[in-house]
Amino acid sequence: MSLWNLLTSTDTNQWCGWKQPECEVCAGALNHADLDALKQRVFEAPWREPDLVQLLVMDQEDGFFRTWMIRGNELRQFAPLKPNEEDERFYLDW
């Protein structure tokens, strides 16, 4: 059993309509996951094209995904660090 589900299979086309991404997209929902261990596992995987890998992570209390990519010998975050959910006025009062 896989932790990940391939969302871009031509057999199951889950993208509504006749178009779908021209890449492989996998998704998983992991409750109570050790995100540092997850990022390390993705980094250490034997990717054919490691510079193309993108990991989108949203922790339990986060309001948006953080994007991680392999660059050289490290996994780096490419999403903005600021503003974040802890910053004053991040969430607008309507």
Image: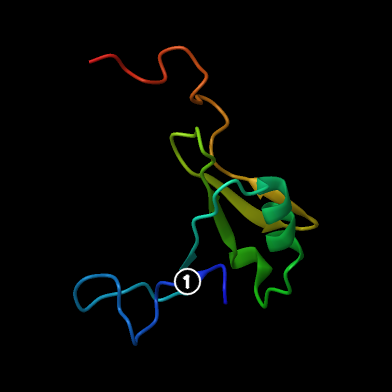
Relative depth, front residue between 31 and 39: 31
Residue 37 is left or right of residue 61, and the answer is: right
Relative depth, front residue between 15 and 77: 15
- Residue appearing at x 39%, y 81% in the figure: 9
Q: Amino acid at mark 1?
A: Asn
Q: Secondary structure at mark 1?
A: strand
Examine the rendered structure and indicate whether residue 30 appears above or below residue 50.
above
- Residue appearing at x 48%, y 43% in the figure: 65
Residue 89 x %, y %: 40, 14
Examine the rendered structure and indicate whether residue 55 appears above or below residue 63.
below
Residue 44 x %, y %: 76, 64
User: Which residue carries the number 1 mark?
Assistant: 5
Examine the rendered structure and indicate whether residue 58 appears above or below residue 2.
above
- Residue appearing at x 31%, y 74% in the figure: 20
Q: Quadrant of the N terminus?
A: bottom right
Instruction: Tell which residue pokes out farthest to the bottom in this image.
Output: 11
